Amino acid sequence: MKAGSMEGLIGASINMKLTRTPMRVFKEAERRGDTETMERAMGYVTDFRKEAHECSDRAQDELAKELKEERKEQEIRRKQALENKEDTKEYVEKVQEKNGQELSKTDRVEISEEGKIVLKNNSQTEKTATTVENTDVKLYTDEGKPRVVEPSAETDDKKIDISA
């Protein structure tokens, strides 16, 4: 927000707050029946409200101007970004021409023969380690004693023997 719109908004707010005092005076004079004081207080209220309305209108005008300026600035920034992007593309093309190669978007990895042998040895040790793992499932009773689970001969799936 810029100075013009801030000035308008603050002016409108202050003038609306200033109407409180003459309104209080108006209500007090109304209770007493003093019409002359009521008319004078209502004149002040009217003046402050008019001023608040004018400040509000100024703020609206300034906000519209600021919005237009902001849109122009955004358009300029967008054009500059596009120009920078085109400049970057031109730079990459020049580098590619200079090097005589085309830059790819993917990386290439070559594994040496020695690396392939190490990988093969590691994968064999992993296979043997997984076959040696203990696949027994253990369950515990309410008393905390272990209950052995044996594979069933009926199917390949393991079934739990709860009869212990």
Image: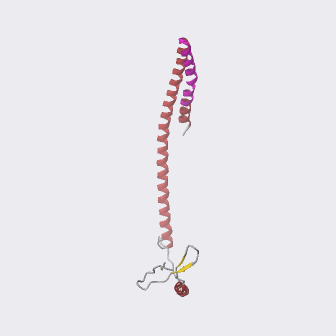
Which segment is the magenta one?
Answer: 12-35
- In the rendering, at what x and y percent does residue 105 appear? 47, 70
The quadrant where residue 2 appears: top right
Q: In the image, is residue 26 above or below residue 156?
A: above
Q: Position of residue 150 (x, y in %)?
A: 49, 83
Residue under the point 54% across and 15% down: 30
Residue at 49%, 66% (x, y): give it. 92
Q: Magenta segment: does it hold 34? A: yes
Position of the N terminus by quadrant: top right
Q: Is residue 3 above or below residue 103?
A: above
Residue 152 x %, y %: 44, 84
The reply to whether the magenta stretch includes residue 68 is no
For the point 49% across and 27% down, the residue is 53
Residue 155 drawn above or below residue 16: below
Query: Which residue occupies the foreground of this view, 7 or 150?
Result: 150
Q: Quick check: 146 above or below 113?
A: above
Rendering coords of residue 28 (x, y %): 57, 17
